[in-house]
Amino acid sequence: MSVFLSIGTNQGNLKQNIKRALCKISEFAFIKKISKPYRTKPYGYLNQPDFINLAVEVSTDLLPLEFLKKCRSVEKELGRVSTERWGPRIIDIDIIFWDDRIINENELVIPHYDMHNREFVLKPLLDICPEFVHPVYKKTVSELYAELTLKEEK
């Protein structure tokens, strides 16, 4: 079972936040691949520091909602507090893909509903799964990234 995550931080010691998040995630999932970290501009709410974002591929025997709860627990343990949408954060862990499954529940939508519009998600994914096919759009991560960069050039 391959699960792809997007991890980001823009508060405190960014490298340490990422390192601690990966360490905690490794307690309930096997980390298979990690992209290089990317410094990215904020999305949505722009008046905040830049982010460090990366993508991670893990395998797990947990069910999707159990896995989500574990990720939320990691965020809370590392000091994340709910503030404004798209605001600054110590750590953000989003589930982007869960193999080729489509999940649409109150608490969890996979694939991530807006990942195809977010360079900070797609660019790191290019490092670890460029040929992975989005189960809804039927396009590879590479194709989605190319479309996004064309859209942003206009």
Image (spheres, grey):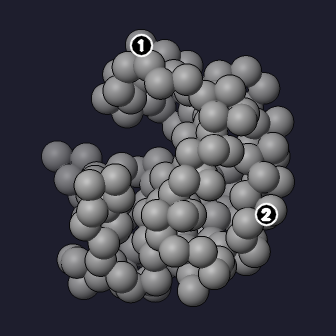
What's the amino acid at mark 2?
Ser
Q: Nearer the viewer, mark 2 or mark 1?
A: 2
Q: Position of residue 107 (x, y in %)?
A: 34, 53
Residue 53 falls in image quadrant: top right
Say which label, 2 or 1, has the lower sequence index: 2
Q: Residue at coordinates 47% horizontally, 31% vertically from top-left?
A: 41
Q: Which residue is mark 2?
A: 26
Q: Is residue 90 visible?
A: yes
Q: Residue at coordinates 54% horizontally, 64% vertically from top-left?
A: 66
Q: Which residue is mark 1?
A: 47
Q: Position of residue 108 (x, y in %)?
A: 35, 58
Q: Position of residue 98 (x, y in %)?
A: 46, 76
Q: Residue at coordinates 41% horizontally, 51% vertically from top-left?
A: 119
Q: Residue at coordinates 81% horizontally, 46% vertically from top-left?
A: 19
User: In the figure, 50 relative to 145: above or below?
Assistant: above
Give whichever of 61, 39 is nearer the camera: 61
